[in-house]
Structures are given as C-alpha cells and as structure tokens.
Amino acid sequence: MASFSKKSNLLLIIILLLMNVTFAQEKKSGPIIENYGKVWAIENPDYKVNKDTTFKAVFDIMNSPEDSSQLNTSLETAARFLNMHAQSGVPLEQLKVALVVHNKASKDVITSKAYKAKYGVDNPNEDLLKALIEAGVQVMFCGQSSASRGYPKEDLLDGVQLSLSAMTALIQLQNDNYRLIKF
C-alpha cells in the first residue's frame, strides 16, 4: 500500500509540475502586427526601455527559406520588433521601421499571382508584408535584385518601393539615423 501511495504522490507532483509549465508565460503577437511577431513579455528588466525616444530601425533582409512555401522569419523580425516595443509601452508613432529586401529574399515581395506562377504556391509572406506596410513600415526592394532576378516592378506587392539598390537604401536610411539591424 505504501508503494501505491508513493507512486500516487509522485504522479501528483509530476502533474503539478507539468501544469506549472503549461500555465507559464507564453509568447504573444500584437498589438501592432496580429498573428505574426510573437514575443515574450519581460517583467521588470534591469535595462529599461526608453519610452520617450523614437526607435528607427532598418532591417537588411537578404535571405529566404529554400522551401518557397515557408514564411521568411527574417521579415517576421520586424513584426517582433514592433510588437515587443508596443507591448512594453512604446507608442507606434515612436517606432519607425524599414525593410531593405534583396538577394535571395527578392521573391518574398512579389504578389501571390507572380509567386504562384514561379513557385506553384501563394506567397507565404504576403499577409505579413501587407500588415507591416499597413502599420507604416517602409519596404524597399533593391532595383539591382529586381533586374538580375527577374522580379519586375509590376509584380511587387502594393506598398513595396523599388530603390536603385539595397546599398543606396541602406546608406540613405542610416544617414536619416535609422540603425541597421542584421540577423
């Protein structure tokens, strides 16, 4: 009988531990970009977020998954940036974000119609990019990548801006005090 009681107690402890893990904090998206950019809430960080500053970030997006049906998580980093700062109390007006897209990521900024013609599936990044653009994110596409990779301006998603080059866009944005973020 004592053995059964020990097993029952051990089972109860394991269940309670699993419940604790289950009810532990979870990553969440929003409030700016819903369904994308999930982040952890960080309670009482030692290095505090300055809620009185304007955050200007430019993301250099040059890679994309080999599998054309997969979301480009590099693009989602911009959603994470927006959501984590908004969840920490920074207003959207103080979050200035730009994406400079080139190289292998070039395919990610074209319409689903053009994407499907080349890859046989809808563009998995289209909804994310539309949400980012709607939130005020600037999306610049390298003109050199457009020409060399065969993605003409008319195939770009609405709101994507064609630039002379990724280099040009990155320099100009940094001259405007955007901080380069490269993952």
Image (cartoon, rainbow, N blue to C red):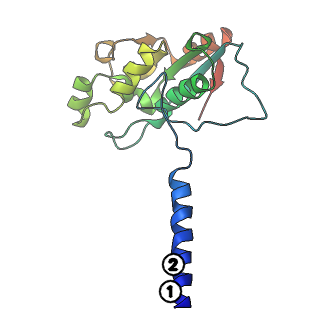
Q: Residue 141, percent across and down?
A: 44, 18
* Mark 2 surroundings within 10 Å by alpha-carbon count, few (fewer than 14), some (14 through 19), many (20 or more): few
Q: Is residue 84 left or right of residue 44?
A: left
Task: Check disc 2 and give the amino acid type.
Answer: Ser
Outermost residue, front direction?
1
Q: Residue at x 50, y 86 (%)?
A: 4
Where disc 1 sits, the SS reads helix
Q: Which residue is mark 1?
A: 4
Indicate whether 182 appears above or below 139.
below
Residue found at x 56% / y 83%: 6
Q: Which mark is residue 122?
A: none
- Residues 103 and 46: in front is 46
Residue 97's place in the image compared with 126, above or below, is above
Image spot of residue 105 (x, y percent): 43, 30
Residue lying furthest right in this view? 46
Q: Nearer the viewer, residue 5 or 147?
A: 5
| Residue depicted at x 72% and y 25% | 49
Callouts 2 and 1 close, C-beta under 8 Å: yes
Query: Which quadrant of the figure contains the C terminus?
Result: top right
Residue 11 placement, left or right of 177: left
Check disc 2 and report its element: helix, strand or loop.
helix
Note whether 125 is above or below 2 in the view shown.
above
**Residue type indicated by callout 1:** Phe
Camera sees residue 149: no
The x, y position of residue 42, in whole percent, is 65, 37
Q: In the rendered image, which quarter is residue 172 located in?
A: top right
Q: Is residue 59 depicted above or below 71 in this figure? A: above
| Spatial separation of the CA atoms under disc 2 and disc 1 | 6 Å
**Left or right of 163: which side holds 9?**
right
Residue at which label 2 appears = 8
